Image: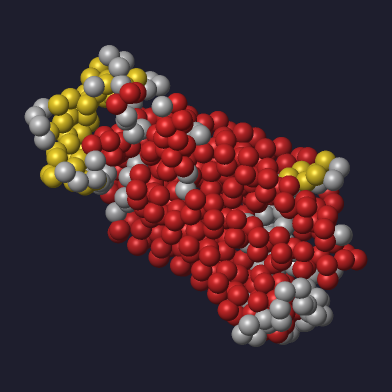
Amino acid sequence: MELKRKKTQTDDENSRIDYGIIFSVMVLALIGLLSIYVAASHDNGTVGSPVKMVVSQLAWYVLGAIGVVIIMHFDAQQLWMIAPYAYGVGIALLVAVLFLYSRDYAAQTGAKSWFALGPFSFQPSELMKPAFILMLGRVVTEHNHTYHEHTLHSDQILIGKMIIWSLPVIILMLLQKDFGTMLVFLAILAGTMLVSGIDWRIIFGLVTIAAIIIFAAISLVATTSGREVLSHLGFHAYQFERIDSWLNPAHDTSNNSYQLWQNLKAIGSGKLTGKGFNHSNVYVPVRESDMIFSVIAENFGFIGSCLLIMMYFLLISQMVKVTFDTKNEFYAYVSTGIVVMILFHVFENIGMSISLLPMTGIPLPFISQGGSALIANMIGVGIIMSMRYHYKSYMFSSDQFD
Amino acid sequence: MSKKERNFNVELQEVSDINWNVVVVVRKHPQIVAHITKLDDNHYEVNQVSDNVAPKVVVNNIEQALNSALMQFNLHLH
């Protein structure tokens, strides 16, 4: 009898865990570890021992997995309560990093966005992403329960609230000179806005304004006088160089476009099926982190790259399915934010790798080397898994009733 | 039947053989949040009182129906 009860409890626990999401993340983790190994073993002199790098990344995965298990146990009420505190802590860290940023990282990347303590480094903006998503989810859910009917007026108020909660993050990202991460926050804001029930006329207006701003920005970047204006607004030479190397990567292959050009050669040399595992003869700087896609494309070719993209879509489809199953409003907004966060990272990273989009320091989720980004993505996975875990937890069984 | 949760109690009130009300009691204030109707042995329809999101859902058993009603009712807002 005791044995039977234990078995039932285990079955119940198993049905609450989303093994599909775990499988997808594990496959991506495996691809990531193998890719880091390949990158490090070919760039041994510059990035350190391959085994050390793989073990270090594995340690981050273990830490991330512990994070997933902890966060999975938070239900909607707890996530709801945590949201403002997480947002507050995130903002405090983003302010702190402006003063205590790593001078070495700033010299290398131009961004004041890293804390460094001895061999450990940490990017607070990565941890801000899930906190921001939770806060936006809370803001939209609260608004929709205060204003039951969507009118143009109530939608304007909602947009105002969302912008007010986003502005501190956007401003702090600009102060850190981390343009790429700022785009991720804007993408999360846009995605949540899209599903928040705002009238399509307002959405259409916002899209039009965004299109005008993008067109104006490209026009300014493409002209000398425009660049002078942008320089006065705080944009830096390295940002213009990235635009130049994006628009014309073949123009300056020895200097500014070197990384992108080498990256394109590596991807192209993989052809249809790739050169095979651990075969690489095109050097790409920092390919273990932001340029990791070049390793996958060179080793496994077009087919391997397509399979990788399909794996991301599998993960995202599983995340969306969980959201549809739970049918909880707060979860829906939070889930949208997480899906947009992962999707934007994938789109931007692979886009810049194939020269479709300008270069930004955005890593490939679950694959690029780096602890902060991985932990942020794992927190996202933990939140999604908590949805299924608690969807089942409300289930009643007769012996639980008074 | 009823169950104690962290900040609220939940009662499944039997109206007839095929109809139930889901009652959530927050701070001794009971409110009906959803109606459940048995369509056949394998189909239960959940109708939320609030039509804010997904007002009608069909699931396979009474436990899932109750669960669905609670998930759609934003407990954290009450």
Q: Quadrant of the N terminus of chain A?
A: top left
In the image, residue A292 lies at what x, y percent? 70, 67
Q: In which quarter of the image is residue A119?
A: top right
Q: Quadrant of residue A124?
A: top right
Q: Tell me if residue A290 comes above or below residue B14 in the rendering.
A: below
Foreground: A203 or A57?
A: A57
B53 on left or right of A45: left
In the image, residue A221 lies at what x, y percent? 62, 72
Q: Tell me if residue A272 comes above or below residue A56 in the rendering.
A: below
In the image, residue A69 lies at what x, y percent? 57, 39
Q: Quadrant of residue A29?
A: bottom right
Q: Residue placed farthest to the right in the image?
A: A45
In the image, residue A35 lies at what x, y percent? 71, 66
Name the residue rendered at 20%, 34% in the picture.
Answer: B34
- The answer to whether residue A172 is seen in the rendering is no
Foreground: A51 or A359?
A: A51
- The answer to whether residue A115 is seen in the rendering is yes
Q: Quadrant of the C terminus of chain A?
A: top left
Q: Tell me if residue A34 comes above or below residue A86 in the rendering.
A: below
Q: Tell me if residue A200 comes above or below residue A143 in the rendering.
A: below
Foreground: A132 or A397?
A: A397
Colouring: secondary structure
Name the residue rendered at 25%, 17% in the picture.
Answer: B29
Name the residue rendered at 57%, 35% in the picture.
Answer: A70
Q: Residue placed farthest to the front in the image?
A: A1
Q: Residue placed farthest to the left in the image?
A: B16
